[in-house]
Amino acid sequence: MSDHFDDEFIEADELIEEPETDLEEEQPEEEHVPVKDEKRLLHREIRRLKVQRNRQRLIIALLICATGLFAGLFIWEHFRDRTCGKPVETEVILEHDMGFGSPEGLADRITENYVGYLEKAYVLFGTYPDCSYYKVVAGVPRDDYDFKNDFYTAAGERYMNYYPDGKKSGRVAIDVSTYQKDVDWEAVKESGVEVVIVRTGFRGYGEDGTLNEDSQFVNHIEGALAAGLECGAYFFTEAVSYEEGVEEAEYILDQIRPYHVTQPVIVDTEKISAEDVRANDISNEVRTDALCGFCETIKAAGYTPMIYASTAWFCQAMDLSRLGEYEWWLAAYDTPQFPYHVEGWQYSSTGSVPGIEGDVDLNVWLR
């Protein structure tokens, strides 16, 4: 048995040795790539990676746009019935959670900001929202005064004045007519008044509309000038045409020609509650024609024309785009809400002035 196993063992060893081969000979030789080809392959791979990266960016951008579009369509569809064809009320918006929380008083602040915008673009009469709007006219000099903070009666002073940056820059003026009699003009001047605007006359009511001289005109203008006060003059108009405006201007020019009038010559236009009033219901165009007739005639004569009216009458009763070249005198007995530049502010019709019995109109004169 041992010989048999040895023979088998030898045969096995021979079998194992027969398939041995040289492994190094079976491996293929390593391929050597030239340097230029390596660079070319590297550049090609870089370009491939760049193209792949740009494709990825484009896909991401398209996904973001699609997401935004679908979100916008969803929001529009959700709120379409509430916003289509009519203004959105603030209260409706604030019923919903705004995401960042709804601060207390937000609706009031929104309304306040909106009214602030309205007051820049319109003159409001009444309290918002129950008010009427009059568009601010382009091309007319705008208000550059802070009526709320710069106009006041300083300590030790009798009358209101204009104090930008705390420095007095206005003058005290009064206007007088037949309703002020027996005036002590020296006492008026000593009280601090510097300018007097004297009514010269008025046009009567009714169809005739006759021109009339103020009964105190001569006394007032002579007394004021003698006391060393500067004087202007005004005429109460009821003109209903350009020609009648010219007629009123020529009338007042004849009255003031003998006197040294250095302040403006003024047309006083107002709405009057009386029978047979001529000019209340004429159109704004016709009223503006009459005012232009007056102002053009005064200017041609070498004087400075001025228009006197209330806030409402300025904004509601005339075409201001045709009157912006002239000076304005505003009557407003509360803090003015007036967007246009003025040269005089009549702030009281019940003032008290030493030397004059009864009420007197008081003005801050800004020229």
Image (spheres, rainbow, N blue to C red):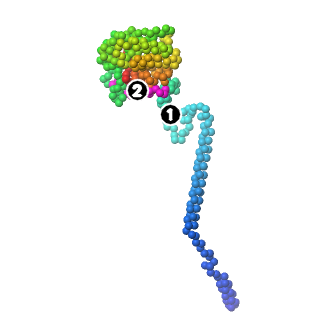
User: Which circle's residue, 2 or 1, is located before the other in the chain?
Assistant: 1
Q: Quadrant of residue 332?
A: top left
**Magenta segment boundaries in residue numbering:** 136-154
Give the amino acid at mark 2: Phe
Instruction: Residue 177 in the image: state x and y as whole percent.
Output: 39, 12
The C terminus appears in which quarter of the rendering?
A: top left
How far is mark 2 from mark 1, CA to CA? 25 Å
The N terminus appears in which quarter of the rendering?
A: bottom right
Residue, x 33% and y 26% (percent of image)? 168
Question: Please, what is the dominant secondary structure of the magenta stretch?
Answer: loop
Was residue 150 drawn as part of the magenta stretch in this picture? Answer: yes
Give the amino acid at mark 1: Ile
Q: Nearer the viewer, mark 2 or mark 1?
A: 2
Q: Which residue is mark 1?
A: 110
Instruction: Residue 182 in the image: state x and y as whole percent.
Output: 34, 10
Q: Quadrant of residue 169?
A: top left
Secondary structure type for disc 2: helix
Q: Which residue is mark 2?
A: 147
Residue, x 42% and y 12% (percent of image)? 251
Instruction: Residue 59 in the image: state x and y as whole percent.
Output: 60, 52
